[in-house]
Amino acid sequence: MPTTTITKSLFVALAGGLLAGPVSAQEENKLYLFNWTEYMDPAVIQAFEDQYDVEVVESYYNSLPEMTAKLNAGGVSQYDIIVPSNYYVPRLIQSGLVQPLDKSKLSNLDNVMTEFADPAYDPGAQYSVPYQWGTSGIVYDTDTFPDAPKSWSLLFDSDVNPDQPFALMGDGQVTMGAACAYLGNGYDCDDPEAWQAAARLLLDTKHRATFSGFTDGTPVLQQIQRGVVRAGVSYNGDYLQQKQENPEAFEHIAFMIPDEGTEMWVDTMMIPAEAPHPTLAHQFIDFVLDAEIGAQLSNYIYYASPNRAAQPMLDTVLTEPPVLPTDSDRARLAFTPSLDGQNLQHFQQLWSEVQSR
Amino acid sequence: MRTSRFRRGLALFWWLIVAFLYLPLAVIVFYSFNAANSAAYFAGFSLRWYQRLAHNDQLLGALSNSLILGIASSLIALIVGTLIGYGLYRHRARRLGWLIVLIYLPIVMPDIVFGISEMTFFVTLERHFGVLGPSLLTMIIAHVTFQLPFVALIVYSRFVGLDPTLFEAAKDLYASPWQRARHFLLPTLKPSLIAAFFLSFTLSVDDFVISFFTAGPENATLPIYIWGAIRRGVSPEINAIATLMIATVMLAAILSLLFNRRDRPGRDS
Amino acid sequence: MAESPFPLAAHSRSISPDTRHLLWSIAPGAIWIVIFLVLPSLYLIGVAFMTNGAYGQPQMPLTLDAFRQLAGFGFLGWSPGNLYTLLRSLWQTVVATGLVILIAYPLAYYISTCREKWRAIMLLAVVVPSWTNQVIRAFGWMNLLSPGTPMAETAQFLGLIPPNMGLYPSNFAVTLGLIYNFLPFMVLPLYAAFEKLDLSLVEAARDLYASPVSAFRHAVFPQTLAGLLAGTVLVSIPAFGMYVVPELLGGGRAMMLGNLVANQFAGGSNWPLGAAGALIMLLATLGGLYAMRKVGKRLGGGEEVVI
């Protein structure tokens, strides 16, 4: 019977394929880096590849929820390095998605600035090493808003911005924090009452005709360049990087830290619990902690470096606003609170309500 | 006459819909040659976005992933699906309602449900048994699953269009089933097998949602890359990639038209 | 030929060669679909009844929490967000399917009346845009509808949208995207129906009834009903679960069930809640299939349910 043999051999081939698949899926000399978009200098990757004779495979995300979802969907055993922000660090540790660092493998650990060496989000820095730090603020078109107030009202008050399209950030915690700050409850509010007020404000804002959508920090810079929106929420370093790349388009686009307060964040390097190449991952972290590499990285992506040894080699633009906020602005910054248990559930209910109504 | 006015109205309607169908594609092609980064004005003809593509390793990797995925899954789907199509035809007198439902399931199921059920299933298998973590293999499996029914239906409808006496004649002519398959079935089926392969391939390249949920870190396909690029907001380059994909599809359409003309003088679907 | 409802049990004595042939030809594909689609779907249904872990992974004990959450009951009492999403999905599906029918019906008729050599080309012309990726298609509309484009400025001029805005993101853009995506799915089965149309019946009806409207109602429409219903199933079920179009063209104000489900897996991390939403879509799918079978049996004589 011809059909019989064909089918049989097909089954054999398929069964063979199924068993062989996972074995050959990941090779030894590869490092799987899961990072924010536009957040790495290709030359740094190249240098690491040359030094250790490996290949670095980069994947990207635009938001932390997106990153966590990928980790939960099998990524925990596929990526070697992830770059989450401070407020996701505790929940990654508690849910067992990351592994403790072997500090004996990190010879450059002393390069980390003292204020980042023992952070509240990861006491003793057992699991994380700081990558870069920065702020989230408002980007806006200065032609459209020549007299923009230094305030969240540019987004939330329809008297201040009656007829220009604007976007809010897709990360719920940042957007809720911004609404809290505008309402006078502080960016780092975390009690249900303040959140409910913030959620109500967001619902009203969302239903204004000029609201154009929830857009994350990197893409909103493209939208504002193209005139799709005139104001949005983005990150200081991404703003600066794009501005250096495209000065004429950004001539009339500004970055501002609202007086009501906003986010300061620290992005960290962590190793997923079942990372396929933990040794290589440690080598990579140590590589980034190197003074020269650290400086090269920051000079490329325009973010402030938590690397003390790298400071003398940083370009001057990295030592002034918006990368390093003025002292008065710095006093207005706060960490996004890390949520767990009931608090997290509260937040998620309110945020999904904002998204779906 | 009233009917002719009616027909002229219909013809006008037809051209309006054609415009509606091709306008979004035309806009992409048009702006891919725009010197400026804008969808609002055209600042002159330029190939700068295409030049950028040529140096984009990620994009080229995504392209090769799409091709491997498309070809591998289409080949498997072609073999397994042809068998179903043949079985359906040979045994069409039986009550195979349950099978029809099974075959229609992948066609009708919303791809988001399709994608997440595959994803949760594979992730759980990997967690407990260490097999089938998200990778090119899981993507191939998922793609074969939604291609199968289309292959089966194409092959089946080809058989239905045949004169049943041909089968009897073939039985007299060739003694063994093997000969029959080689000299009668395969040549008869050839056009529809080619059509089924190309349709499967198109479906595979066309799919975004299912690939998105079953892909591992190294398996970004072209649509996944484009999705990421849209989310990142780098539009002009997307116009250029999309234009290349649209051009490929148009080429495939023209080829299939020529094939149809040459291979099938008679009418069948 | 065996008349058993289930071929595996065709004969109690032994398996006939004919049945063995059936098994060998159909089993690989059927098993494939069962293992790689039916089993995963069943597993997903199981997840819907599990507990959401503290950080979004499904855990034991079995509970109905996910369904409670889907209905809107959370820590802070009842809220209508998910209900809005569900109603919006239904509304978008009904509007898009209705408009697709209104467009596809005359279109399919027109194609079927054209000369034979043109028909293949015309059908191809309708289908080809759907061969390009749906992400690309949505992106094309993003280009067309964003602020400053002729369409957006026309709409502003007519006062349909506020100044400075685009036509996307909006619910309107989502409806448009759905129609664009699913039009071919309606044109093809309708065309097949029109092509098989028994013209002698139409002629007879013309003589019988005075007005063309009643001739259409009595002679043409019933003959195309099967195609219409097949098309409705093929359009409405995927539209109900659409993810890409609302995500790209809706901009956060047009969330549909597909997005609610996807968000639980690609962001919010509440697998049980996502699975519960998916279960609703699965039920809609099975309902659609069932309806299509019923209709196919009654109208198509049982044999050709093929598109």
Image: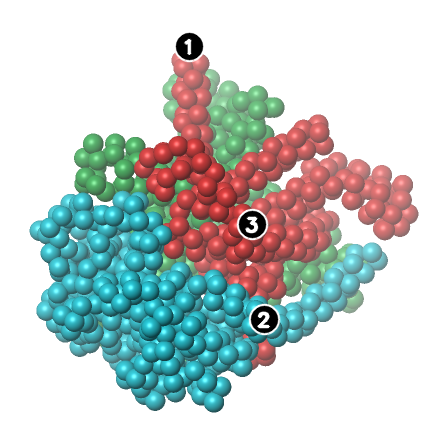
Chain colours: A cyan, B red, C green
Q: Say which of marks 1 and 3 sits in front.
A: 3
Residue C212 visible somewhere in the drawing: yes
In the structure shown, which secondary structural element does the residue marked by tag 1 occupy? loop
Kind of residue indicated by mark 1? Met
Is the residue marked by circle 3 packed among few (<14), some (14-19), or many (20+) residues within 10 Å? many
In-image side of A57 versus A246 (left or right): right
Quickly name the residue at label 3.
B205
User: Which residue lies at the image location 87% right of the left edge and 47% below the top edge?
Assistant: B179
Q: Is residue A296 above or below residue C231?
A: below
Q: Secondary structure at mark 3?
A: helix
Pointer 1 with pointer 2, Cβ within 8 A: no
Find disc 2 in the rendering and name its residue: A54
Which circle's residue, 1 or 3, is located before the other in the chain? 1
Q: Is residue B229 left or right of residue A318?
A: right
Q: What's the amino acid at mark 3?
A: Val
Comparing labels 1 and 2, the label whose residue is closer to the camera? 2
Question: Residue A125's spot in the image, x, y percent?
Answer: 36, 86
Q: Amino acid at mark 2?
A: Val
- Return the residue at label 1: B1
Residue drawn at (44%, 88%) of the image:
A103
Q: Nearer the viewer, mark 3 or mark 2?
A: 2
User: What is the x, y in percent for residue B73?
Assistant: 64, 55
**How many neighbours does mark 2 have within 10 angstroms: few (below 14), some (14-19), or many (20 or more)?**
some
- The answer to the question of whether label 1 and label 3 lie on touching residues, with beta carbons closer than 8 A, is no
Q: Quadrant of the C terminus of chain B?
A: top right
Which chain is indicated by disc 3?
B
Residue C55, located in which quarter of the rendered image? bottom left
x 61%, y 48%: residue: B201
Q: Nearer the viewer, residue A62 or A269?
A: A269
